[in-house]
Image (cartoon, rainbow, N blue to C red):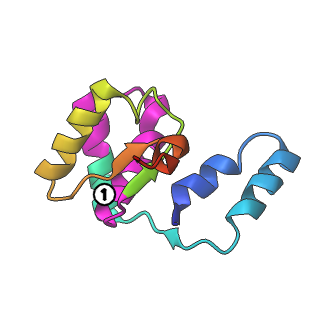
Amino acid sequence: MFISETLIDEVSKGDEDAAKDRLAVLTGLPTLRIDEPTTELAERLVKALQLPDSALLDAYHIAVSAVNGIDFLLTWNCTHINNAHMRHAVNNLCLLAGYEPPIMCTPEELRKVPS
């Protein structure tokens, strides 16, 4: 399991006590850096998908996963990341940029094992 600098920024917001609790859960997990290729892919995703400014962090979650070869991107964000309409376009944009897209799913979807 990996986290990104973007995730740390995101969970640090809001109620101070709740943020401390969220950050404590992430302690010790390897952190993926936001570098130039990640920023370029995130910007490409925002532009091509016509995402609102509020979805910039969502694009960074996808980009940092793709650039670092992460297999799964776990998210409960079904508005800008994990939905049928976006998934196909995200996958194509990652592939066009030369990256294998992560499989985007909720934690519950990942836990389900076919019988």
Q: Is residue 53 magenta?
A: yes
Helix, strand or loop under label 1: helix
Q: Residue furthest right?
A: 17
Residue 100: give x, y in percent of width and height: 22, 57
- Three-letter amino acid code at the position of disc 1: Ala
Q: Is 10 positioned to the left or the right of 16 in the image?
A: left
Residue 108 visible to the viewer: yes
Residue tagged 1: 66
Q: Main secondary structure of the magenta part?
A: helix
5 is higher (above) or lower (below) than 89: below
Magenta residue span: 43-71
111 is higher (above) or lower (below) than 47: below
The local crowd at label 1, few if under 14, some if 14 to 19, many if 20 or more residues have their Cα within 10 Å, is many
Number of numbered labels in the structure image: 1
Q: Is residue 91 magenta?
A: no
Q: What's the residue at 18%, 43% (across, down)?
A: 93
Q: What's the residue at 45%, 41% (across, down)?
A: 58
| Residue 98 location, quadrant | bottom left
| Residue 85 location, quadrant | top left
Q: What's the residue at 71%, 51% (across, down)?
A: 12
Q: What's the residue at 21%, 34% (across, down)?
A: 89
Q: Is 92 positioned to the left or the right of 60 in the image?
A: left
Q: Residue furthest front?
A: 115
Residue 113: give x, y in percent of width and height: 45, 49
Residue 50 visible to the viewer: no
Nearest to the observer: residue 75 or residue 36: 75
Residue 102: give x, y in percent of width and height: 32, 53
